[in-house]
Amino acid sequence: MPVRPRPLLPLWAAVLAAAAGGLLLTAAFPASGWWPVVFAAVPLALVSLIGRRAWAAVLVGAVFGAALFFLNLSFTARYLGPVPWIALSSLETALTAVMALPLALAYRWLPRVAPGTLGRLLALPALVAGLWVSREELLGTFPYGGFPWARLAVTQASSPLADVASWTGMSGLSFLIVFACASAVELVRTGRLRAVSTAWRGILPVAATLVLLLALPQFPTTDAGSIRVGAVQGNGPAGYFDEREPYDVLRAQLAATEPIEDEDLDVLLWPEGGVDADPTANASVARTLDALSARIDAPLLISAVTQRGEEYFNSSLVWQAGADNPTQTYDKRHPVPFGEYVPDRWFFNLLAPDLIGLIQREYTPGTAAPFVDVDGVGVGLAICFDVIYDDVIRDGALAGAEVYMFQTNNADFRGTDENLQQLAFARMRAIEAGRAVVNLSTVGTSQVIGPDGVTVDALPADEPGAMVTDVPLRTGLTPGIVAGAAIQSLLGWGSVVALTVVALLVRRRRGHAEDAGLPMV
């Protein structure tokens, strides 16, 4: 019979380590934003799994997931109470727990196949880091399109490590962070530091990865001039439960726009839901927008709920005086499950009829490229949580975006960290694509972010305001955009395939050992 490796920690200590790792990782996200703590959080999560049996690994993974998600996603309870928060956090915790098992199996099996220095300090950390990425990919795609919110790379939005995403995409950055941490864990476990003659070989993978993370500059994109953007944060009653009369949000946007109407603008940008009526069906609202575009002598990039036939869409619209409006339309590609539509409504209505009944409209996912042309300038788009999905950002860049304009409505999350966490995604997208981003909210946080991730302009949260900014344009595609999807698939699915191959090799060796009457260590 094979001799199982002993757990690195007793179960009670592993549970505590996993909980500490999850809580520390939460501190790496905004508003705290203590990005260096990932290099303590990740090792704590990993050492809690080393040597664990299957159900113990699932338990430890669940503790880590619960500590991370129940705190990190607490903003979802802001208005709708504890049920959505508990449901979403529990789902993410369960998926994290399930994916802890492959990580534990990697620690159990790979040293049997490759027990040498290269196996322990390179192959094992690479497999563990790849499986971490596969877990992020699972959470970001399943179920109902997934919710890729707490990705490790996002914690680095304000750190010097963020530039790596322009080369590898966000998944590649997550991989390198976990690889460095896993290599350091193995360096200590194997005792390579004890002997001077072997220490350098052990330190090399960790040191090389850290140098890469810290020293690799952002991939350069090409200056293509600038576009003068007027961005207006109306601070109107745009929340789900805000008391309001018809057109109150539109009135707030118009009032906040007045101070910049005499400015020389190339485009006027309004946030998600900035027009609280369908201008494609409401002639009065359409005339108001026509008049505004005529006054500023520039096109508008607005957002509203539109209806075509029996279907509703969360839409970005280009609107220009004297044109057959809207001249261009982008419909949100990833409507939020249980926020903008209810999947399997019949089932969930049985569980929480009062909450499900609040969601009357069923938004249809858009199919168009997240891109519009504004007087010859390519603009990549994302509406609210669209920003967390790689395909939206990538497809905008591939369509020819020279700048991104993200429209969002954070009114339902006032007083929480949600707006800052979403802003961290926007900052990472700027760095990843080498493009400036105008991230505009109804209530804040609204910022113009340069192609290097540095804040260029900003508006105070929870106040009406407008900013006029010469936003830089860029051309040229980064490797993170061109190869990001392939890197993610290679790391995520490749690690699953690699673990399967390792499992087959272990089984084969076990069979040979049993035939020879030898113990399998």
Image (cartoon, grey):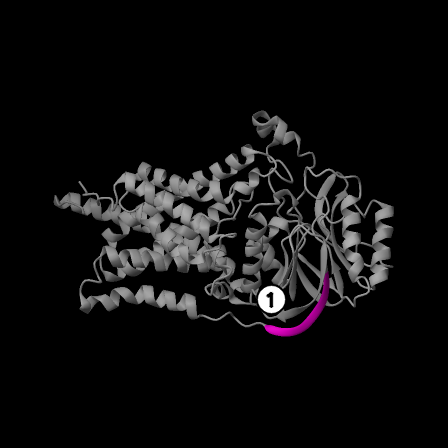
Q: Nearer the viewer, residue 319 or 126?
A: 319
Q: Nearer the viewer, residue 516 or 338?
A: 338
Q: Which of the 4 image quadrants contains residue 460?
A: bottom right
Residue at point 29%, 55% (across, down) = 185
Q: Main secondary structure of the magenta part?
A: strand
Residue 459, horizontal then vertical, whole percent:
66, 58
For the record, the magenta segment spans 222-230
The answer to whether residue 512 is left or right of residue 126 is left
Q: Nearer the viewer, residue 87 or 166?
A: 87
Q: Is residue 334 part of the magenta span, yes or no? A: no
Residue to which mark 1 is pinned: 450
- State which quarter of the image contains the N terminus: top left
Residue at point 28%, 47% (across, down) = 50
Badge 1 element: loop
The answer to whether residue 2 is left or right of residue 397 is left
Residue at point 59%, 53% (across, down) = 387
Residue 414, horizontal then vertical, whole percent:
62, 45
The answer to whether residue 405 is left or right of residue 281 is left
Residue 501, horizontal then vertical, whole percent:
32, 51
Residue 10, horizontal then vertical, whole percent:
25, 41
